[in-house]
Amino acid sequence: MNKPVMPPSSLSLKLPKADRGIESYRLAVSRTFPAKLQGALNRIAFSAAHVVADPLADVDPWLSAAIDWDRTIAFREHVWDLGLGIAEAMDTAQRGMGLDWPTSLELIRRSVSAAKARGNALVFSGAGTDHLAPDDSRNLDDVIRAYEEQIAAIEKADGRIILMASRALARIARNPDDYGKVYNRVLSQVREPVIIHWLGDMFDPALRNYWGATDLDEAMDVAVTVINANAAKVDGVKVSLLDKQREIDMRRRLDKNVKMYTGDDFNYAELIAGDEGGFSHALLGIFDAIAPAASYALSRLAAGDEAGFHDVLGPTVPLSRHIFKAPTRFYKTGIVFMAYLNGHQDHFTMVGGQESARSTLHLADLFRLADQAGLLADPELATRRMTAVLATRGIEA
């Protein structure tokens, strides 16, 4: 079991409250987690990883993405050390919210190269249609060609594919058969089995009615039919609907060779633990923010210590629900803020200026929840950085 290693903290700082008051908040007991994987894992776990912006680049952040490549790859090294895989160039990396396709491809190439240097560390990368301008997406063949272009570029870099949901397809498709036509055609051509990504509209409103159905049960019928018909080309499916029962229902309907990767940032602990009917692997944005705790918890689960797994991972769930609260698409701000608090980057600056997407109160509550879950790697550093951010928002120490 992971033990507290320090007495109750003497650290405190001023934090805003919902009633517009200011409280003196004293940090909780500290916990530490190993910096590298201890033991083995019996679940495949990906962290959808963020990118580190270059705050000194002379660009217009709303228009151009400037990446600190060294820090971005260093963060992936940190995740790999913990035994987790990287889900590259996904929505956590602000794909479609500041990160365009050319920059995404450069990120994928660098990440795949870094993974090879580590003896083929686990990395799958997002292939979508986001380079397709709305005026150039007139029919399903345009969507298919866009998918083919990105898949070919990633495979040329020796990358594995996560087939991302397509805004263009959601806009053009008229019925479930249109989805079947696109996915059947694209999957027939991939070199290796892919992970299908079903992203709910709470993450991206442009994906509303995906799979050609307004009803989620009907949409699941379509998705399961398409996936099972192409099971030889599908490693697994990542479901991000924030609906644990639908994920469980879908998991039980998948072909036995197709994995379920939970994308449920509200209920991941119980879905990964599973039940008598099975379990989910993981492909989660929250694992970016809680990677050391996630690694340690998963190692306890693999060792047969389910109580230890829940002891570590359970307290992270309130933080995750806060970071991913509606509007869910702004969760990236919380992910990057955690990276800043924990010393993985020296600034709280994001691609697209997305550091402004959450309120001061939201960040203060994030700090409280991260502290209470034992997720502040260096509480003194985190306190200094939280204090500095608050000072820019009118709250003096």
Image (cartoon, grey):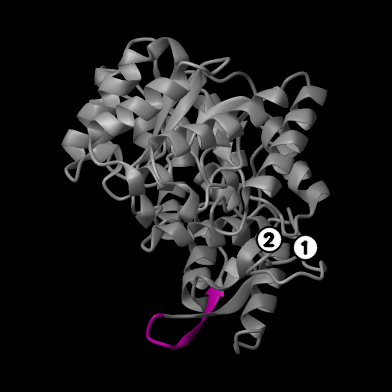
| Residue highlighted by disc 1 | 346
Label 1 amino acid? Asp
Label 2 amino acid? Tyr
Residue stretch in magenta: 18-25
**Mark 1 or mark 2, earlier in chain:** 2
- Name the residue at 20% across, 28% down: 221
**Where's residue 117, x and y in %?**
82, 25
| Residue highlighted by disc 2 | 340
Question: Is residue 279 shown above or below 58?
Answer: above
Tell me which corner region of the image, top left, top right, bottom left or bottom right, holds residue 3. Answer: top right
Disc 1 and disc 2 in contact, CB within 8 angstroms:
yes
**Where's residue 17, x and y in %?**
44, 80
- Left/right of residue 145 with respect to residue 168 in the rendered view: right
Please tell me how many numbered marks the rendered image carries.
Answer: 2
For numbered disc 2, what is the local secondary structure? helix
**Where's residue 218, x and y in %?**
17, 35
Would you call the spot at circle 1 few (<14 residues within 10 Å), some (14-19), or many (20 or more)? some
